[in-house]
Image (cartoon, helix red, strand yellow):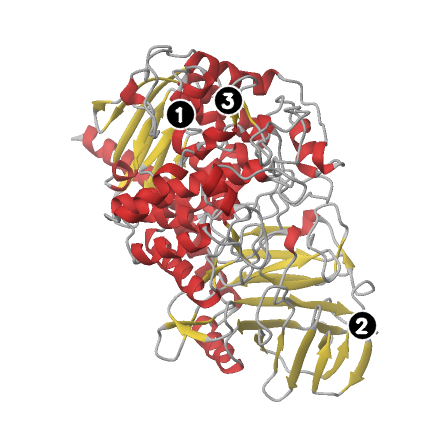
Amino acid sequence: MKKPLIFCAAALFLVNALQAQQANLVKYVNTRQGTNTKYEFSYGNTYPATSLPFGMNTWTPQTGKNGDGWKYQYFEKTIRGFQQSHQCSSWVNDYAVFSVMPVTGKLVVNEDERAASFSHDNETAQPSYYSVKLDNGITTEMTPTERGANLRFTFPKGKGSYLVLDGYTKMSMVSIDPVKRTITGYVNNCRWAPQNFKNYFVITFDKPFTGYGTWENKRNTLKAKNKEAEGEGAGAYIKFKDGEKVEAKVASSYISPEQAELTLQTELGKYHSFNDTRKAADKVWNTLLGRMAVEGGTEKEKATFYSCLYHANLFSHRFFEYGKDGKPYYYSPYDGKLHDGYMYTDNGFWDTFRAQFPLNTIMHPKMEGQLVQALLDAQKQCGWLPAWSFPAETGGMLGNHSISLLADAWIKGIRTFDPKQALEAYYHEATNKGPWGSANGRPGWKEYFADGYVPYTKQTEGATAWTLEFAYDDFCAYQLAKATGNKYYEDVFARQMYNYKNLFDPKTRFMRAKDAKGNWIEPFDPMDWGGPYTEGNAWHWTWSVFQDTQGLINLMGGDKNFTAKMDSVFTEPGTIKVGGYGTVIHEMTEMAAFKMGQFAQGNEPIHHMLYMYNYAGQPWKAQQHLREVMDKMYNATENGYPGDEDEGQMSSWFVLSAAGFYSVCPGTDQYVVGSPLFSKMTITLENGNKFIVEANNNSKQNVYIQSATLNGKPYTHNWISHADIMNGGTLHLEMGNKPNLTRGLAIEDKPFSLSKANRQY
């Protein structure tokens, strides 16, 4: 009788311990991960966003000047405001921003002069809660809702207590109501939006004003007791009694002031106090983080994993709002009109098609279904599929990767859109050049269709990279057409998806640029950055054949030559040759800093490369290199990333890799197996199923898979299907410190490729 009781008590203790651990997973997250960044070198280019997952806006401390894309840099010593942010990249700056700054002593509005010094020792930076005690004694706390936040300011006793609202850049309006204890207004700072774009805000306070006025941030002039102001950089200030503790609730809307008020009531009205809002935000994040519950590993590894999982769930932003009827609608950043339904923005698909959106298909299929339909709605409203929305289409970077999201969703059973409409929209994208940006339509599309590649000239910088990514996108269209019985578009894109072959040079075994007559561009140095390559060189871009790795293996002369070429990426010196850029860019210095030859994890084009060993008979090399990259290049500190985090892509790479698999080719139903970081991960899916990855005997030394079972049956494949994950079950791996040189070598163990292995090799 005693043994069962002891067992039950032990089991109950374990369950309670696991629940307690999951209940406080936010403690592992450092939202300052990757913030020690400069223009010259990126450890992430992030900022400590206090936000709910995929929230319409975030809140962050501001160390940089108004208009500076580097809004929070870890090495800075002062904070000049706490701002509502939407920024997805420092390189494109921010939009719809306003900030508030508590000031003590005398009133100071100038952003430089009001800046207060602080120590990171006095900061707490978690997804659901940020606080800092400034050196002047003021404590600021923030906790989020989806479209707003609850703020709390504690002023030092016996000193003046002011709050300054800064209208940031461009036009703004403020209106102060001392009776209702509110500030309302709008800001319109935005680079890519219709002219009628405005972000309307409302802020309510729980303590009375003892003074107030307006100001403007161009000349920093004040108007005491003035209640309204409109113009460039118009702002407001309010005064409370000395030493006051003030709570503020803030919400915003792109639709109208009335909608901002409604959102304030629906999102924040139900919370009596700041602490109530924080508890609710804690619950949201702990629930989400707990859906990828890890066991084993060190505390540092858990902190890295959960900090990356946080970053992987910030973008895209929900750009829709809920009306009085509870239904979603939105102001379109594309046509400036109101529409029913869902809209998502603030994402650069060149980065995120690779892992962030495939991760969504596992963790958030319902949201992904809304998002892919929103792509087609955006195309109706502006004439082009989004490539980089911020919040409207910018045309940034390269490729037409909306089709990757659409095809990936459909192949994985997320079928919320009309595939014929999607294919028609993509065909328009692929046979036209849009009016802005290199990813708005296709530059060189006529030559690409006629000759099978985009010729390289000074006017077509990046042409080789374009060709490779166009071929992948055409594969995605082919997949969608084939899966939906659309023979016309299947035939259109069946030939195009092999266009990568036209730029492969068998002599050098690199992807190279050609001129309009089909001649190789000379001179050629594979270490030269830029020119025909975007943010990389031939060592990085040669591997961009997601859809047909076997075809690339065949071009290189078989597995042995292919793996030898991959090995050379690491044995080549990490020499920087600026090439067509003519100067050093931060991606170059980041590659050199990690001393792994020409391997450049800090930029997206090479993110899939390590997994390609699985296609060529040496999966153990993928396992070894992947664990090395996870260990050397990622951590939870301010130096947490090997390059720009890029809307969750750098983090999603880590999250999926830590789980033990990766989306090499979105648009297929396969993930390629790597080497899981933890001894166990339990993934709780939206459908209620659980998919478990067990790695028995896992450690820093035991990175090699010795054997595997899936749901108890022997499993030799170097890939796992999306259906296997979504159906739930257990992938059990036995790990060891030496490679198993015989496992996973059969043809059927290789992941998907369009081409078959060439038997002559």
Q: CA distance from mark 1 to mark 3?
A: 23 Å
Which of pointers 3 and 2 lies earlier in the amino acid sequence? 2
Which of pointers 1 and 3 lies earlier in the amino acid sequence? 1
Which label was assigned to residue 84? Answer: none
The answer to whether any part of residue 303 appears in the image is: no
Circle 1 or circle 3, nearest the eye: 1
- Kindly identify the residue that appears in the image at 66 percent across and 81 percent down: 174
Q: CA distance from mark 3 to mark 2?
A: 52 Å
Circle 1 or circle 2, nearest the eye: 1
Question: Where in the figure is residue 756, as x and y percent of width and height?
Answer: 32, 23
Q: CA distance from mark 1 to mark 2?
A: 59 Å
Tell me the kind of residue under disc 2: Lys
Residue 385 drawn above or below residue 228: above
Which label was assigned to residue 625? Answer: 3
**Residue marked by disc 2:** 218
Tell me the kind of residue under disc 3: His
Tell me the kind of residue under disc 1: Gly
Identify the element where label 1 is drawn: helix
Question: Where in the figure is residue 230, as x and y percent of width and height?
Answer: 70, 82
**CB contact under 8 Å: marks 3 and 2:** no
Which of pointers 1 and 2 lies earlier in the amino acid sequence? 2
Tell me where residue 198 sits by quadrant.
bottom right
- Asked if residue 31 lies left or right of residue 72, the reply is left
Q: Which residue occupies the foreground of this view, 565 or 197?
A: 565
- Asked if residue 695 lies left or right of residue 436, the reply is left
Q: Quadrant of the C terminus?
A: top left
Which label was assigned to residue 551? Answer: 1
Mark 3, residues whose alpha carbon is within 10 Å: few (<14), some, or many (≥20)?
A: some
